[in-house]
Amino acid sequence: MDYKELWDKYKNTKDENLKSDIKKEIILKYLELVKVICGRLYNYYGANIEYDDLIGYGIIGLIDAIEKYDPNKNIKFETYASVRIRGTIIDEIRNLDWVPRSIRQKSKILKDTYSKLEMTLGREPTISEIANDMNKTEEEVLKLLEETSLYNIVSLEDELKENFKIQIKDESIFASPEEATLKKDDIDRLKKALEKLTDREKLIINLYYYEGLTYKEISSILKISESRISQIISKTILKLKSKLEII
């Protein structure tokens, strides 16, 4: 049974038993996609969750994608499912409230310091300036950036979702016209914030978010250390969060 025939039968059959069998076939066909996505996310969340739990969340996302996918739209199922799978996993992890309070506090202090200095200086503050304002060494600030990197990424997704009704990881990318209605000024604000990133920041964010590469893979491409990749991503997220607030 080819790809189109498989989806036609699944969407059009009235036989619930046959529909269930076809769904199982589709799940098995795309189980490897779930494993690939879970493997990448495990690199970031591994200290907080079991790999098998990620697989379970990923399968839930895959099933959701199968049930909501419209083969008549000009979107490959792999693309649609990848967004759903990753989104479901991250939502489930977020619901576990896995981030320690200390990390939340450190992230807020960093963001507030960055925003204050940017307003005062009229430009992006350097690591040295952030360190001086916080009465810390540059090494301590870099360590803070690394410690808060994952939380900053997840919290930015929350801010975009809450404040701009934009879900960079979820179904709004493929929603109906009614579901996908976004305020133009909000989108413009996000675009302006992204435009202010340096070319390297844009590249790294693109590789990490949209290409789904790991720190190790990005490190290999750009020839800089994984810890440096983590620092750049975290500082870039701080910059985006700051600009989304003050634009």
Image (cartoon, rainbow, N blue to C red):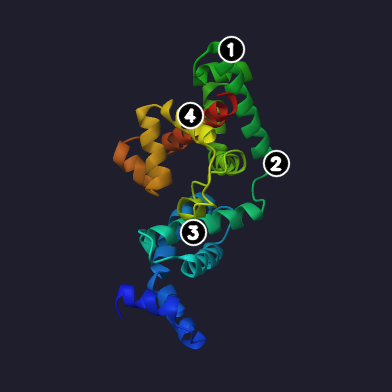
Give the residue type that dot 4 points to: Ala
- Within 10 Å of disc 3 (Cα), the crowding (few <14, some 14-19, many 20+) is many
**Residue placed under numbered mark 2 in the picture:** 101
For marks 4 and 1, give the one nearer the viewer.
4
Using residue 20 as the reference point, say whether residue 214 is left or right of it: left
Secondary structure under tag 3 reads helix
Instruction: Return the mark for residue 193.
Output: 4
Q: Amino acid at mark 2?
A: Arg
Q: Residues within 10 Å of mark 1 (few under 14, many from 20)?
A: few
* Image quadrant assignment for residue 143: top right
Whether residue 66 is situated above or below residue 185 in the rendered picture: below
Q: Which residue is mark 3?
A: 84
Q: How far apart are labels 2 and 1 at the CA level?
A: 29 Å
The residues tagged by marks 3 and 2 sit, at their Cα atoms, a distance apart of 28 Å
Neighbours of disc 4 within 10 Å: few (<14), some (14-19), many (20+):
some
Q: Residue at x 46, y 28 (%)?
A: 192
Counting residues from the N terminus, which is met first, the one under dot 3 or under dot 2? 3
